[in-house]
Image (spheres, grey):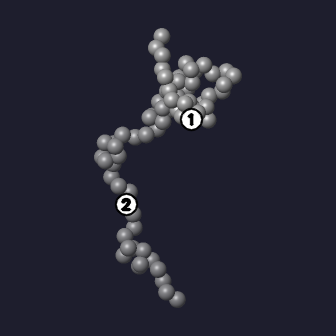
Amino acid sequence: MKNVKVSDETYEKLKNFVVDPFDDSPEVVIGRVVDIAQKAKTRWSPLDDYAQKEPPKGRSREEVSEAVKVL
């Protein structure tokens, strides 16, 4: 088994987000943090995929100004 040391500051941050002092062991807490990180990673798209997509076509200023009618 490996030992992990964290600063008091990091421990306090963990307590605010994922630690239940009555039920959670360090193993459970670290496992929960890893699960959160994996879920976040799957929701992000790689920058390479983003660069290959065409940018959305927006309306130019000319199109907007033509659509405005003055009464």
What residue is at 34 percent from the left and 43 percent from the top?
Answer: 47
Q: Is residue 28 above or below residue 18?
A: above
What residue is at 41 percent from the left and 79 percent from the top?
Answer: 66
Left or right, 17 with reference to 57: right
Q: Which residue is mark 1?
A: 13
The residue positioned farthest toward the front in the image shown = 8
Q: Quadrant of residue 57?
A: bottom left
Q: Which residue is mark 2?
A: 57
Query: As shown in the figure, which amino acid type bears the numbered disc 1?
Result: Lys
- Label located before the other in sequence (2 or 1): 1
Q: Is residue 5 above or below residue 10?
A: above
Q: Note whether residue 36 is visible.
A: no
Q: Is residue 5 above or below residue 42?
A: above
What residue is at 54 percent from the left and 34 percent from the top?
Answer: 9
> Marks 2 and 1, Cα distance to the nearest angstrom?
43 Å
What residue is at 47 percent from the left and 80 percent from the top?
Answer: 68
Viewer-nearest of discs 2 and 1: 1
Measured from the top left, where is residue 15 in percent x and y?
61, 31
Q: Note whether residue 27 is visible.
A: yes
> Foreground: 42 or 63?
42
Q: Secondary structure at mark 2?
A: loop
Query: As shown in the figure, which amino acid type bears the numbered disc 2?
Result: Lys
Q: Could you classify mark 1 by the number of other residues whose Cα lies within 10 Å: few (under 14), some (14-19), or many (20 or more)?
A: few
Left or right, 63 with reference to 11: left
Q: Secondary structure at mark 1?
A: helix
Measured from the top left, where is residue 71 in percent x and y?
52, 89
Q: Could you classify mark 2 by the number of other residues whose Cα lies within 10 Å: few (under 14), some (14-19), or many (20 or more)?
A: few
Q: Is residue 22 above or below residue 47?
A: above
Measured from the top left, where is residue 42 in percent x and y?
45, 34
